[in-house]
Amino acid sequence: MDAQEYDVAIIGGGAAGLGAATTLARSLRRVVVIDAGEPRNAPATGAHNLLGREGINPLELLATGRQEALGYGAEFIDGTVVSAQRHTDGFRLGLADGTGIGARRIILATGLVDELPEIPGLREHWGSRVLHCPYCHGWEVRGKEIGILATNPMSAHGTLLFRQLSDRVTVFLQPGVEFEDEIWDQLAALDVQVVEGRMLRLQEAAGDGKAQLEAVIADEREMTFRMDALAVAPRFRSRGDLYQQLGGTLSEHPMGEVIPAGMMGVTDLPGVWAAGNAGDLKATVSVAHGAGVEAGGAVNADLVAEDARQPVLARRG
């Protein structure tokens, strides 16, 4: 089957992809968004720090954004891109259903995967009572019992951020993790309890009807601790398979793996941009959207320059 041809193919229909799509469509570009329908924040009840849309349901936000992009002429395909190849006049993308897409430029807005510690119960509560970002969900647990799963030394920084929100914070220090003396002094001064021992599982707390979590910790014996929320620092892995197929190499970051992207999302691969969590592991929804707008503008400018060169060369003929 012949591939449909577009100016730009955006892979990923989250905040970054939608921001890029609207920007490009408003510049009269023929743009397609291929969306696998796997938004990272789907388990969350609300998206925060969004001007004018504070607390909106993440899925509602994406549905609204899609309608806005459609209104300017952007096209959408619900599907998964499984292959990407460079072609003489751009790129060829292969979808899981066997169809193909041709595009002069690509924006990778594929997001990232949160790799949680292998502790039973964490994934089941991820995005609701198992959290990682104090700016995304901290207000909702202010003043409550907050646990911190300390899986690396950087967990100390997260502890201080959540301590700003509650004076009832407990750190569950996992085996092999060590804090510097200064951190221990800070935790003691802030009355942060530290429990050493491996977390075996996280489960619903039984009993008084209060909706809480219960962590089972193994030290010399098993102990249980109740909390309203547990903060976890996952390892972030950018969805960079297509970038690698095109010849790119992911960068190692203290927080995980990421597509290396520069200003306005430009990558080392000509014709390929990255936006949102694909190129910035720490990007929140509002930041990802802004990055998509920037990448869309950069891609349009790149196409404008190319389109201006061609008639000049033809005229010189």
Image (cartoon, rainbow, N blue to C red):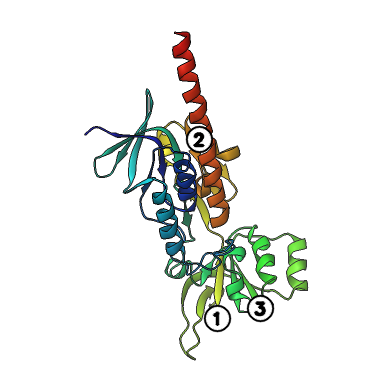
Q: Is residue 147 above or below residue 87?
A: below
Which corner quadrant holds the N terminus? top left
Q: Are marks 3 and 2 in contact (CB under 8 Å)?
A: no
x and y, in percent, of residue 264 in the image:
57, 39
Dot 2 or dot 1, earlier in sequence: 1
Of badges 1 and 3, nearer the viewer stands 3
x and y, in percent, of residue 245 in the image:
40, 34
What label does residue 168 carry, if any? 3
To which residue does mark 1 refer? 226
Q: What's the residue type where badge 3 is placed? A: Arg
Q: Please say whether residue 260 is visible from this viewpoint.
A: no
Q: CA distance from mark 2 to mark 1?
A: 50 Å
Left or right of 253 in this view: 65: left
Taking the view exactly as shown, the residue that stands out farthest to the bottom is: 208
Residue at left offset 49%, top offset 44%: 23
Q: What's the residue type where badge 2 is placed? A: Val
The part of the image, by quadrant, that contains residue 125 is bottom left
Dot 3: element: loop
Dot 3 or dot 2, earlier in sequence: 3
Q: Please say whether residue 7 is visible from this viewpoint.
A: yes
Q: What's the residue type where badge 1 is placed? A: Arg
Dot 1 or dot 3, earlier in sequence: 3
What label does residue 299 carry, if any? 2
Of badges 2 and 1, nearer the viewer stands 2
Q: Residues within 10 Å of mark 2 (few under 14, many from 20)?
A: many
Q: CA distance from mark 3 to mark 2?
A: 48 Å
Dot 2: element: helix
